[in-house]
Amino acid sequence: MNDLDLQVAEFAREMLVTSLVLAGPVLLVGLIVGVGVSVFQALTSVQEQTLSLVPKMLAVLGVALLLLVPALGILRDYTLRVFAQLVSFGLS
């Protein structure tokens, strides 16, 4: 592999890690709340559809709003690193 291939592979790895860092907390909270609501529904035999949707939706929205500023900072830093490396690809 030449140097350009290694740079492209590094960009792809960094993109995947950044995506996981940005989406991971939101998805994890949705998973935890969903499992908690499912356990509650199984224990109480309450099978209301909105009971499974509304708490999960509110939790995901709350975490997304709470982490919005740090997520935008991470995304800004990643974008600046990508734009700084465009010169090495000859795309300036």
Image (tube, rainbow, N blue to C red):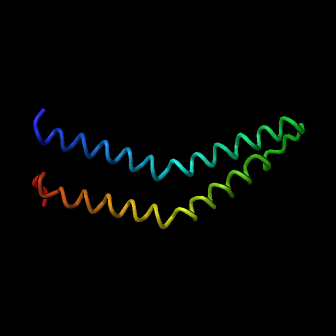
**Residue 38 occupies quadrant:** top right
Left/right placement of residue 87 relative to residue 20 reads left
**Residue at (49, 50) in percent of width and height:** 23
Q: How many marks?
A: 0
Q: Quadrant of the C terminus?
A: bottom left
Residue 59, image x, y percentages: 67, 56
Query: Is 9 above or below relative to 59?
Result: above
Left/right placement of residue 13 relative to residue 92 reads right
**Residue 77 occupies quadrant:** bottom left
**Residue at (55, 50) in percent of width and height:** 25
Residue 46, image x, y percentages: 88, 41
Residue ranking furthest to the top: 1
Left/right placement of residue 67 relative to residue 40 reads left
**Residue at (45, 61) in percent of width and height:** 71
Residue 60, image x, y percentages: 62, 55
Q: Nearer the viewer, residue 53 or 87?
A: 87
**Residue 12 occupies quadrant:** top left
Left/right placement of residue 14 relative to residue 37 reads left
**Residue at (60, 58) in percent of width and height:** 63
Residue 86, image x, y percentages: 17, 56
Query: Is 41 above or below relative to 67?
Result: above
Q: Quadrant of the N terminus?
A: top left
